[in-house]
Amino acid sequence: MPNLRDIKRRIRSVKNTQQITKAMKLVAASKLRKAQQAILVARPYAIKIMQVLNHLVARCNLDLHPLLENREGSRVLYLVITSDKGLCGGFNGSVLKRAMREVEESRGKEISFVIAGKKGRDFFRVRPQKILHEYLDWTRDFDYMKADEIADLLAGMFAEKTVDRVYVVYNEFKSVMQQDVVVEQLLPVVPEETGIGREEGHVVDYIYEPDEETILEDLIKRYMTVQVYRAFLESSASEHGARMTAMDSATRNAGEMIGGLSLTYNKARQAYITKELIEIVNGAEALKG
């Protein structure tokens, strides 16, 4: 028969855990609202800068900028964005699983990584992978300047021909319940074909001020920074959404566990009371005899 004191101790412990998961859910919900607002601001700008780049690249000489060089090579770099903390369901596992799948599908190539987040660092630390840089605690103070720093690092390695391809692996935010793992090519810059500006098979050109090369240089730098910045914002919102969902599930599971333990406690208490009553009745019968 279970000990009533042990059951009460377990109920109290689960209730304390439930209070923690409730608080973490509320904190994640608050951070998620801010992260969603940041995405809503960044997405239109990222789309527009891509459209402008499409216009320019469709008309310019691709040899004007080293980040447009689509060269053959076997050196591939992945920027993998994970969280610094756990308790967010399958958020980190899905990104890391996809990154390892990319490695398996790229056999024969020289793979290297730039890792953002402690969870990614811990994962790759025990695996024979080449880690070039680590960015830890990025969720604490990440901003546009930090994205610019990372973009400059990636662009510099590509321009110096240290790597031939650069990809980013992250969770794209869809909703609180859905985050999709995305692998996007950052370098070389390959804008989407839009057909904008083409009339009757001819390319409509523009007059550039100060000149085409200067505009391209500034635009590609902005493009790189914005794409990196957006990827981190998407990952941040996805993390908060995943943690909010995980803590909500944990809170409900704790409630179910408390209900089960309370039922067990009541049954055990009833059994003790019944046993004591039987002992009293038996004692009274013995005195009569």
Image (cartoon, helix red, strand yellow):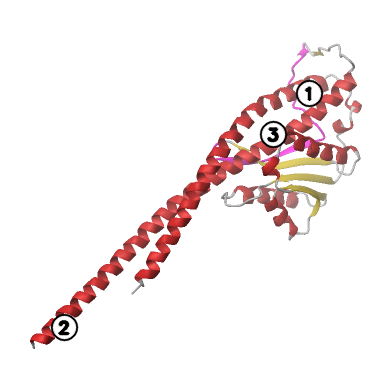
Q: Is residue 100 magenta?
A: no
Residue labelled with disc 1: 53
163 and 42: which is toward the camera: 42
Residue at the limit of the structure toward the bottom, as seen here: 289
Kindly identify the amino acid type of the residue bearing the numbered disc 2: Gly
Kindly identify the amino acid type of the residue bearing the numbered disc 1: Leu
Separation of marks 1 and 2 at Cα, in angstroms: 94 Å
Separation of marks 3 and 1 at Cα, in angstroms: 17 Å
Q: Is 57 left, or right, of 272 in this rendering?
A: right
Decide: marks 1, 2 in contact (CB < 8 A)?
A: no
Camera-nearest label, 1 or 2 = 2
Residue labelled with disc 3: 230
Q: Is residue 178 magenta?
A: yes
Q: Is residue 171 above or below residue 66?
A: below
Kindly identify the amino acid type of the residue bearing the numbered disc 3: Arg
Residue labelled with disc 2: 283
250 and 193: which is toward the camera: 250
Camera-nearest label, 2 or 3 = 2
Residue stretch in magenta: 175-199
